Amino acid sequence: MSRTREQPVTPPSSTPAARRAALPAWLRAMRPRQWVKNVLVLAPVFPAGEQVGLDTLLGVAVAFALFCLVSSSIYLVNDARDVEADRAHPRKRFRPIAAGELGVRAAVALAVVLAVVGIGTGLWWQPALGVVLAVYFAVQLGYCFGLKHEPVLELGCVASGFLLRMLAGGTAGGIPLSGWFLLTAAFGSLFMAAGKRYGEARRGELTGEPVRRVVQKYSTSYLRFVWTLAATVVVTTYALWAVEVLVVQTGTMLATTTIVPFVLAVLRYAVDVDRGNAEEPEEIALHDRVLLALALLWCASLLLAVWL
């Protein structure tokens, strides 16, 4: 008589949902891990030099907090709208809304509250900051309701999110931003956005997992062209900013030394993009120690050039 072998049962504590159950569903649905992207509001602070004061730091801190609220409202709207598709996805099915831990109506209500509080506070704190937040919300809302299915346009929407964060930092901190700096930010954003799509396309090729509809419309060779082009422009515009703006501002050629760690950081990030590992930029930022070291070296050299 044969004995049926029992299949091992996965302990509840080891499931993805259980591992994250330490946080309430509504907070997990806001994707707090994604808030690391909002650190980009600090970017204009480093080269500002003597312009940085308590008012500047306070303004940037407010911009960071408000971007966390408004970006989370977009994540909630996106997940509420895509709930059925997420339930069929091998990883996204564990998101609180798709898993049924947070109702769609409750998620939309929370999204409205976060958006109103975030944009309203921004307008009250500084009208220009409120306008940047409103533009970000409008663009990302358009992304949620159709633009994410349009090739190239969706890349622009994703890239604009990174750019507007930097613009918010300069606006809230009262820091004037040069054209070269904004071009560096814009194409750096496009570099990360194309890297995200390339990573998803590569994952789909290697594992056979379903990828979003718009990614299916790209070829990996096209996405490689986009992020290569963007990286080239980023390096060029940053070098021009360092030589034509930062050297004039600081009065020393020491500012040109910041180009070295910056270029090395771009090349290091490109390694992750080329491997198809850049689908989640925040994960790279948190776990790539070499990239973190290069970023710290760049910050140190920039601060040295500005304050020496």
Image (cartoon, rainbow, N blue to C red):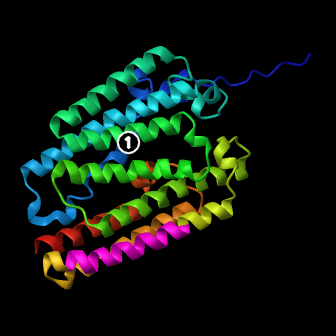
User: In the rendered image, which quarter contains the C terminus?
Assistant: bottom left
- Most distant residue in the right direction: 1
Please say whether residue 138 is visible from this viewpoint.
yes
Which quadrant holds residue 179? bottom left
Rendering coords of residue 215 (x, y %)? 65, 48
Rendering coords of residue 18 (x, y %)? 50, 24
User: In the rendered image, which quarter contains the N terminus?
Assistant: top right
Q: Nearer the viewer, residue 179 or 235?
A: 179
Residue at 33% across / 64% down in the picture?
295
Q: Is residue 164 left or right of residue 107?
A: left
Please, is residue 39 above or below residue 3 in the view? below
Which quadrant holds residue 125? top left
Magenta residues: mostly which secondary structure?
helix
Magenta residues?
228-247
> Label 1, on which residue?
136
Rendering coords of residue 29 (x, y %)? 44, 27
Please, is residue 5 above or below residue 62 in the view? above
Residue at 60% across / 56% down in the picture?
198
Residue at 41% across / 37% down in the picture?
138
Is 172 a magenta residue? no
